[in-house]
Image: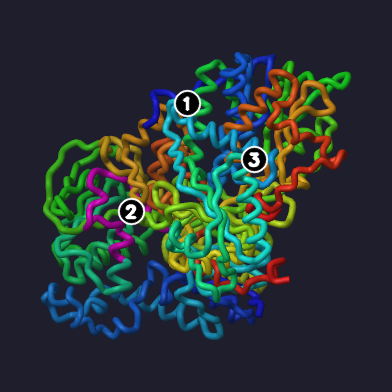
Amino acid sequence: MKYDLIVIGAGPAGMAAAGTAARGGLRVALVDSAAQLGGQFHRQPPPELGGGNVRDDPTHERLGRDQSIEQAIQAPAPRRDFLRLRDRLTGVDLHLGCRVWAVEPSFAVHHDGGTLTGERLLIATGAHDRVVPFPGWDLPGVMTAGGAQALLKGNLVVAGRRIAVAGTGPFLLPVAAGLAAAGARVVGVFEAARQMGALARYPAKLAEGAGYAATLARYRVPYHRGQAVVAAHGADELAKVTVAKIDDGWRAIRTREIECDALAVGYGFVPQLDLPVQLGCATTRDSDGSAIVAVDDQMRTSITGVHAAGETTGVGGAELAELDGIIAGHSITGTPLPDGVRRRRERARAFARLLHEVFPVRDGWRDRLRADTIVCRCEEVPYQAICDAQALGAVDTRSLKLLARPGMGWCQGRMCGYAVARLAGEDPPPPRRPIAQPISLQNLAAYPLRSTNDDA
Amino acid sequence: MHPDRMWRSAEPRKSYDVIVVGAGGHGLATAYYLAKNHGITDVAVLDRGWLAGGNMARNTTIIRSNYLWDESAGIYEHALKLWEGLEEDLGYPLLFSQRGVLNLAHSLQDVRDGVRRVEANRVNGVDAEWLAPEQVKEVCPIVDVSPGVRYPVLGATYQPRAGIAKHDNVAWALARAASDLGVDLIEHCQVTGVEVTDGRATAVTTTRGRITANKIALSAAGHTSVVAKTAGLDLPLQTHPLQALVSELLEPIHPTVVMSNAVHVYVSQAHKGELVMGAGIDAANSYRRRGAFHIIESQMAAALELFPVFARAHVLRTWAGIVDVSPDASPIIGLTPVENLYLNCGWGTGGFKATPGIGWCYAHTIAHDTPHPLTAPFTLTRFTTGALVDEHGAAAVAH
């Protein structure tokens, strides 16, 4: 059976688009690698962990409080948004727990459990954490901010007892607030940016931020601007971090050490473009230099029949993603857009651009690399190997990859891609990954075999 | 591991004694032996992309010489002998590992062909053994040799001296050595045409200007026919994508190289631990460096019957190389109807293993304007005379 529309990614953008298209009368499939709807922002725990019953969970004991983690981390407003998005999905076929590894024209969507076919495609695969390396970042206990939040929301697991949250961007706030509310001692939020006055132009967003700030205040979590974690230390696992006051170029000025057993660190997000690049969709650059899918005002990509929405078209948060999804859904069904959507989207997009300005990633992180600092974890490539390759004449990302192998391993450059590109003096090129998700050979081989000469 | 410097990056000059088109393994080896064996150093190797970024970066690095016919055994065994001394010659680690290659037989016809090939190999001085299924199991314990499977293993040819090498290192070592001897390696310089005057090749036009040369040697794999066409040569080549894939890193588990013509798959484990698996060619002609998924899907289904242990290994990347397949699955090497224009093409799926051997012989051909004795049978004219060298059986991947 061929669907009218296959939506890949069940975050705010994908859910909104799928719901809109289904209400417009289309036969819609919604696919996501997670077992639950919601994507990263609305990530839900599996039913067997749900209902607030986490008493058997070892972390619960550690929390020493009666409140369930799930209740503690569920802010009421996002919960309402999620339920609204979910309730609109009536009639949509859900394909959850399906990791899409490839898409082919007109349109076959290959996932690890089979293949779906559809007349049209909407790609809403979101983004993943942007990582910059620093000494000790590969120690157990150091994780991305998104990783810490996924553990918390998706598994009701608190990443540590004493947790530092560091990096840049507004995303650090909900991460720290969630961890604190779940019972962790958050020893501080270390935000690299310093000037945030410009955000005052968006009162609604400011109020959202104030809500998180109130949570942090309630749990006595200090919020430091103009500071960064510049090194992590520990014998076998994280024991402490070095925190530095940094200048505008992110060079460390003064340092101090703080004990902690977990560090959640995030420097914004990298849009996930594997599938649109496979299809040949044109890409462009976001204002922060990230490669993104080029879309028109209908969220149409350069490939006929393919729409994109949400973070793949520029990182901007859940509200913008949802509005993208609504616009894409109406574009696909040919139904008129409700009043105000486009205006709200323009405002949300302008806010996203402002966030890129207020929370930039400066190249000063490179000063913290030591010869033995691992840049690519999968292939265990130290900074020295990158320097050696550059000394041999590798002047771009591709040559660095060829000579020193960063990005050739398990994650295929998702972790180190940004850093390696910046070390080469480039913005990261759009990813080329013919296999968008690691797929097992048995899954690859499981497709019904076409008749070949062997069978004749 | 790397020396202080790899090679000089050169700007194209207006004129060279010899221009080699294509800076893959064959082109680099040819330049190296032109300089080393023949003292010809006024040489430029031109490439439309980066050095060794074509099939040299995309092949599965299998090295063997167990071909059926005397002609093929001659050139491939010459290459294998050179491989055995190449690390020392080039002063660079190539990770050349003679771990042996098994070619599996799955039908009685395969068995007959295999036994015949082993005998032919021995007569030609190429090491070869015929192994019964239980001996296959001894060499490679993870192959399923049980009789009930779709492709039962009825035996295998085995060449112990065969193996693999690290393709990047081979390219870098040859590039460095050629550069040291004075050869210009010029990347991002696409040859757009070969100028022919009075039946004689005189220059190439490129994206970086016109370059004249006394001799022009083509070595551009799947794109050779495109370049040759600009000189008025219509080559009997079909260009196809050939796919390969690589898995996540695994502990050492696969001690040798296993190939199967019937299944169209070949598997080895690289030095770092990833499985490297190659497929058969995509049937459609294409210059696109990506193949169709159904090819690798059906081939992995068959491969997993041979190697059930790999079922849960994850694929990290797939890619394709652009291969030039000739009608008899043997290469075309030597002179052309155009004076001073030389051909090295038609290697199909198997060019890597020949790298030093063909460099040696092609350099001789260019230097003396006469085919090297080992490559003399592989003329372009054999497709009109009928003196074919039919290696479809030993090419290991169906063409």
Query: Which residue is rendered at x = 64% and y = 15% of the image?
Result: B13
- C-alpha separation, residue under disc 1 versus residue under disc 2: 52 Å
Residue B368 x %, y %: 72, 18
Q: Position of residue B100 (x, y in %)?
A: 49, 48
Name the N-terminal-most of marks 1 and 3: 3
Disc on res. B90: 1
Residue B339 on the magenta span: no
Q: Which mark is residue B380?
A: none
The residue segment tinted magenta is A128-149
Q: Is residue A289 above or below residue A77?
A: above
* Chain hosting mark 3: B
Residues A38 and B83: in front is B83
**Subunit of mark 2?**
A
Circles 1 and 2, Cβ within 8 Å, touching? The answer is no
Q: Is residue A265 visible?
A: yes
Query: Does mark 2 fall on the same chain as mark 1?
Result: no
Q: Quadrant of the C terminus of chain A?
A: bottom right
Q: Quadrant of residue B17?
A: top right
Which residue is depicted at the point 47% across and 66% down?
A: A440
Please name the residue that numbered disc 2 is placed on: A169
Q: Amino acid at mark 3?
A: Ala
Label 3 Cα crowd, 10 Å radius (few <14 / some 14-19 / many 20+) = many
Secondary structure found at label 1? helix
Mark 1: few/some/many CA within 10 Å (<14, 14-19, 20+): some
Same chain for mark 1 and mark 3? The answer is yes
> Left of A218 or right of it: where is A394?
right
Q: Which residue is mark 3?
A: B73
Secondary-structure class at tag 3 = helix
- Mark 2 surroundings within 10 Å by alpha-carbon count, few (fewer than 14), some (14 through 19), many (20 or more): many
Is A138 magenta? The answer is: yes
